[in-house]
Image (cartoon, helix red, strand yellow):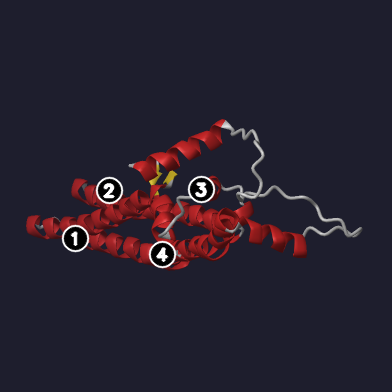
Amino acid sequence: MMKYVNGQWIAAAILGLCLLEIVVKGMLCLVYRRLLCGAKDMGRSNHPLMKTLCRKFETCYQLQIGVPNVNVFVEKYIRHYRVLGLHLHGWESFCNVCMLLSMLASLGSGIIAMILNVGQYTILGCLIAGIVGNGLILLFDCLYGIPGKRELLHIDMVDFLENIYKPRLENETFHSQMVEEYRQKYFEEEPSGKVVSLKAKGPEKKKDIAIEFTKEEEKVIRDVIREYMG
């Protein structure tokens, strides 16, 4: 009777590991959905990661440093993003460990039960628990589609920064006169025909303007300069 109860506990532990992995991957799925929603309109997103990334990207151009490799820039911030104190890659590794432990527990307990001649019910219970649990993991992996969400997130972020934000910042930083003329021509002409005056960033206006930064902006600028200067 005791051996049969122990077999039940082993099967329950195997299923518990599988259920834990399913729950953690469900949490990751929700996190990636929030990130994707923020990446769809990255320039106006309120998501902390998107705001930080855009602010750092803009600061690099304000300091005339630029971002030569946008792909690496995006990948860096995705990999450093934390959920409940752990990186996204760390949560995915945790799920893989749970799956590995459930498989080892299922096969190992079945082999040990055979060696000790505990009984066929214990052996079958452990093996069936492992098969059912890992089958559920594979099913939910297909439903969650976490690798596809991660890839789509990376594409959306790189697309905005590389194809939209980077050209705009390059023009504003290195071709400010051209940008001013473009805005006056297409965007800033009022119904009365009066053109709204713009703040030029080029050398043609040399007025002393007091620029004030918030503490958050100062921190971003220091971080960017520290990274650039090594």
* Label 1 packing within 10 angstroms: few (<14), some (14-19), many (20+): some
Residue under numbered circle 3: 49
The amino acid at mark 3 is Leu
Image disc number at residue 9: 2
Q: Residue at the spot x=82%, y=59% of the render?
A: 189
Residue 147: image tag: 4
> Which amino acid, mark 2?
Trp
How many other residues sit within 10 Å of disc 2, few (<14), some (14-19) or many (≥20)?
A: few
User: How much space separates mark 4 and mark 2, taking CA atoms?
Assistant: 33 Å
Q: Is residue 36 above or below residue 16?
A: below
* Spot occupied by residue 88 in the image (x, y as percentages of width and height): 39, 51
Check contact, mark 1 vs mark 2: CB within 8 A: no
Secondary structure, mark 2, is helix
Q: Which residue is mark 1?
A: 107
Cα gap from disc 3 to disc 1, whole angstroms: 42 Å
Q: Which mark is residue 140?
A: none
Kindly report which numbered mark, 1 or 2, lies closer to the viewer in this rendering: 1
The x, y position of residue 68, in whole percent, is: 42, 59
Which quadrant holds residue 150? bottom left
Q: Crowdedness of circle 3 by 10 Å Cα count: few (<14), some, many (20+)?
A: some
How far from the left and from the top, in percent, is residue 185?
Answer: 76, 64
| Gap between marks 3 and 2 measured at Cα | 43 Å
In the rendered structure, which disc, 3 or 2, sits on the residue that comes first in sequence?
Answer: 2
User: Would you identify the image quadrant in which residue 118 lies?
Assistant: bottom left
Q: Secondary structure at mark 3?
A: helix
Horizontal relation, residue 196 to residue 82: left or right: right
Dot 4, how many residues are within 10 Å of its Cα: few (below 14), some (14-19), or many (20+)?
Answer: few
